[in-house]
Image: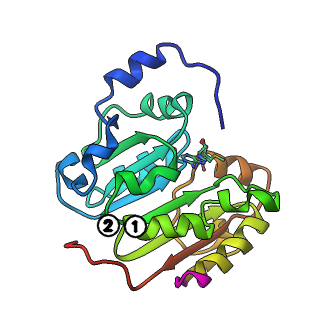
């Protein structure tokens, strides 16, 4: 998702007090980027930020980090929120996650990630074995991955990939909107729901990652 230029983009990025420019510097000490020491949840590909901003507001007992690779997109999130004590954003590619985090994340959200339909691109999917290995390096405790998607093919791939990587599928829905599972909508999700698409959801958990104090 690339967006047309926002006016004053550079100024908005520069003046933000939730955007972290030097994410590598916090590796192993992300708690120091927040006001309270509490579990850290990460959203990869947060887009314009509706989900993570609302989650941070509803869950003050959790610290949230959003990663998005495009300036033009992350700036949209910055225009929606001035400051939240439990929210930080990083402009970066998720391929670099292990250079930012060292066993300090307890949950990853993947919302409407790019489906990469061609087989030769499957390793770019955020639930590919390549990414799950990267997540092992950033996760602490009993890590959880929550995925929402409208794409049945990506969903099926994710269920298999997560299972083969030692995750247990703890919550599953083939129609999240009509399930009892609590949900905060993303921008893409709103669009798919308007089109009448069912939303697929999985929460998967693994029991064996290096422990954390939280
Ligand atoms: C289809 S959009 C979904 C946005 C949002 N999660 C939502 O549900 O409304 C996918 C977003 O993920 C971002 N993205 C995709 N691959 C990424 C990566 N490897 N690292 C960081 N961001 C990524 C894209 O730039 C895009 O903004």
* Numbered label tally: 2
Quote the CA–CA distance across marks 1 and 2.
6 Å
Residue that numbered label 2 is attached to: 103
Q: Secondary structure at mark 1?
A: helix
- Residue interval drawn in magenta: 163-169
Q: Earlier in the sequence, mark 1 or mark 2?
A: 2
Residue 160 point in image, percent of width and height: 68, 80
Q: Tag 1: Cα neighbours inside 10 Å, few (<14), some, or many (≥20)? A: some
Instruction: Name the element at disc 2.
Output: loop
Q: What residue did someone put label 1 on?
A: 137
Q: Is residue 180 magenta?
A: no
Screen quadrant of the N terminus: top right
Q: Is residue 158 left or right of residue 52?
A: right
Query: Residue 120: horizontal and vertical position, in percent?
Result: 79, 59
Q: Please give the name of the residue rendered at 40% of the width and 74% of the height, measured from the top-left corner.
A: 143
| 17 and 213: which is toward the camera | 213
Q: Is residue 103 left or right of residue 193?
A: left
Circles 1 and 2: CB distance less than 8 Å?
A: yes
Q: Residue at x 34, y 57 (%)?
A: 101
What colouring method underlies this structural image?
A: rainbow
Residue sitting farthest toward the top = 8
**Foreground residue among 32 and 53:** 32
Is 29 situated above or below 182?
above
């Amino acid at each position: 998702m690339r967006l047309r230029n926002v006016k004053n983009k550079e100024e908005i990025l520069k003046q933000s007090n939730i955007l972290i420019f030097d994410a590598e510097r916090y590796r192993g000490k992300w708690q120091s980027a927040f006001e309270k020491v509490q579990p850290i949840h990460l959203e990869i590909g947060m887009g314009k930020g509706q989900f993570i901003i609302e989650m941070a507001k509803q869950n003050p007992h959790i610290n949230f980090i959003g990663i998005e690779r495009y300036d033009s997109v992350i700036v949209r999130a910055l225009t929606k929120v001035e400051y939240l004590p439990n929210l930080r954003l990083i402009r970066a590619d998720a391929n670099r996650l292990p250079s930012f985090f060292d066993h300090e994340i307890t949950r990853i959200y993947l919302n409407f990630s790019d489906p990469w339909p061609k087989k030769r691109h499957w390793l770019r999917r955020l639930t590919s074995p390549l990414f799950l290995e990267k997540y092992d390096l950033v996760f602490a405790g009993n890590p959880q991955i929550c995925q929402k998607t409208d794409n049945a093919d990506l969903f099926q791939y994710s269920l298999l990939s997560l299972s083969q990587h030692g995750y247990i599928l703890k919550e599953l829905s083939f129609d999240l909107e009509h399930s009892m599972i609590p949900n905060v909508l993303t921008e893409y999700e709103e669009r798919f729901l308007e089109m009448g698409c069912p939303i697929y959801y999985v929460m998967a958990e693994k029991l064996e990652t290096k422990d954390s104090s939280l």
